[in-house]
Amino acid sequence: MPTVYLLDYVAGNIRSLANAIEKCGYTVSWIRSPEEVANADKLILPGVGHFGHCMSQLASAGYLPAINAHIASGKPFMAICVGIQALFEGSVEDPGVPGLGLIKGNLERFDDKDKSVPHIGWNSANSGSKSLHDLHPGSKYYYVHSYMYPYKAGELEAQGWTVATGTYGNETFVGAVAKDNILATQFHPEKSGVAGLRLIKSFLTGEGVKSLGQQLSGPAPTGGLTRRVIACLDVRTNDQGDLVVTKGDQYDVREKGDDRGVRNLGKPVEMAKKYYEQGADEVTFLNITSFRDCPIADLPMLEILRRTAETVFVPLTIGGGIRDTVDTDGTKVSALEIATMYFKSGADKVSIGSDAVLAAEEYYSLGRKLFGNTAIEQISRAYGNQAVVVSIDPKRVFVPKQDATRHATIRTAFPGPKGEEYCWYACTIKGGRETRDMDVVELVQAVEAMGAGEILLNCIDRDGTNSGFDLELINQVKSSIRIPVIASSGAGNPGHFEEVFQKTPTDAALGAGMFHRGEYTVQQVKDYLAEKGLEVRQFEG
Ligand code: 1PR
């Protein structure tokens, strides 16, 4: 099999890229020193995290002259995500740190006045009438970034680049560029399903370069960011010791009969693949009992992730047990080390639950000061804030008057048992077993300050009820922060997805039980949303 060389210079999920390359019929060889770059024919520069971190890692390890020499030799070169950013002169993310300067210009941050930042999800890479490798203007690609190069018609073209763009809110940005032997994408082709694999293959075979200038086929071009539909698998060990997908009713995952066994809805790897093939935009695994076990001992979970990443080419999130802990042999293990194990096994994001609440309590008790020592800060510093999700398990608390509590209340359209017209949402830990004196607004604002990139907003009252998402909760949280929110809990039919996208500004919506029980497929939800005029990614087989 022909070989592709991948630069192994940063932490992050590069396993998925290797899996995607192998899926295209190539072997991956890792480059671990600048001297080895000269051996490479086809070279790929993956990128995660900060622009400055990426450039300083490359510079201090002595890679920059070797990369420049590879590009100048005319051998194929591909750069991904922060990799494309490295081609520019610099970035406002880390002013003063120079890029490679192959493209004139400096990266800017998305404006978050009217939209969530980071920009996370499936968006276009539209090269107009020009063919850029095998990009299709009607396909969608997975982006996750806060910084971008704003597109100005004709500017990069005048430097000889073919450009594909995406649009987010009222900003049009550079999604991909190509020139001679160089292809660079702001999106992650290895996480962009079949459309992304097609692009990787086109780069590897060189056919894409030949097709430059040809007329394109495929779906017609459409608008910007799509509505993300996520399938979530709650995973735990059952009484027989097997890791199974389960699903609770208001977090109770045991059967209602006498034996009260753990509800077993299937095998995690197979179910994740099924949802990928139905068109899920992301798959999330929540290891729901790892708060009480040491996740280091949870090697089967790592194996599940590894096997899933071999066949599922959309983003994978893993949650459960991400906190500083002590291994079974007494060794201290940091949350960052646990997250690293997950990233190396194929996770793109980690999701933190209980530990985030405890960290937020400390943040407020210390007068809203941060010392860089929380799991959220450490993981986002190393892997970028887009890699850190905070999963929240709130419960409604009714109060008779708006000022009956110090917490952030809302007037509810669904009064409480004693006719209470106000409520607030209390945060819980340990899978809802313990309620804390902290409301959701306090929590999301604290974790946003710590560097979390996204909120997974569950709701214990709605979980497993099939009664629809808690729109009041979602609106309250969305109005408190700038980072994206995934609405979760209560989805029972495709109409609930339409409702949450129409009646709240949520960035994504997640379903579990209705998919696991086979009542609806992800495809049916997306078809329904498309019928109602909402932009979705159409699955390409
Ligand atoms: O606290 O960092 O160890 O993380 C534990 C994680 O496990 C948290 O993300 C927490 O939400 C989750 N978790 C803990 N216990 C349960 C449980 O169900 N007993 N599951 C649990 C949370 C919520 C969603 C669910 C949606 C949609 N499950 O994942 O999929 O509510 O369900 P639906 O569409 O069927 O209504 P830590």
Image (cartoon, rainbow, N blue to C red):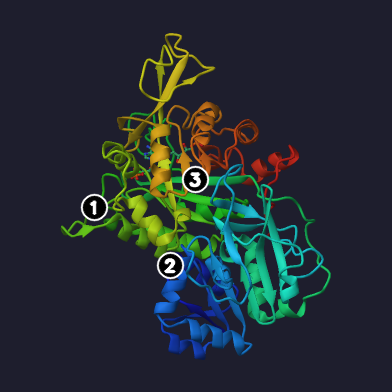
Left or right: residue 145 compared with residue 362: right
Measured as percent of width and height from the top left, residue 299 is found at 32, 59
Q: Residue at x 42, y 9 (%)?
A: 418
Which picture quadrant has residue 204? Answer: bottom right
* Residue pointed to by mark 2: 53
The amino acid sitting under disc 2 is His
For marks 3 and 2, the one nearer the N-term is 2
Above/below status of 522 relative to 54: above
Above/below status of 531 relative to 244: above
Q: Quadrant of the C terminus?
A: bottom right
Measured as percent of width and height from the top left, residue 381 is found at 39, 58
Say what secondary structure mark 3 lies in.
strand
Of badges 3 and 2, nearer the viewer stands 2
Measured as percent of width and height from the top left, residue 427 is found at 36, 32
Q: Mark number for residue 325?
A: 1
Left or right: residue 118 compared with residue 332: right
Furthest residue to the top?
418
The reply to whether discs 3 and 2 touch (Cβ–Cβ < 8 Å) is no
Quadrant assignment for ligand 1: top left
Question: How far apart, in angstroms, are the residues tagged by discs 1 and 3?
Answer: 25 Å
How many residues crowd around disc 3 within 10 Å: few (fewer than 14), some, or many (20 or more)?
many
For marks 1 and 3, the one nearer the N-term is 3
Q: Residue at x 56, y 67 (%)?
A: 85
Say what secondary structure mark 2 lies in.
helix
Question: How far apart, in angstroms, are the residues tagged by discs 3 and 2?
Answer: 32 Å
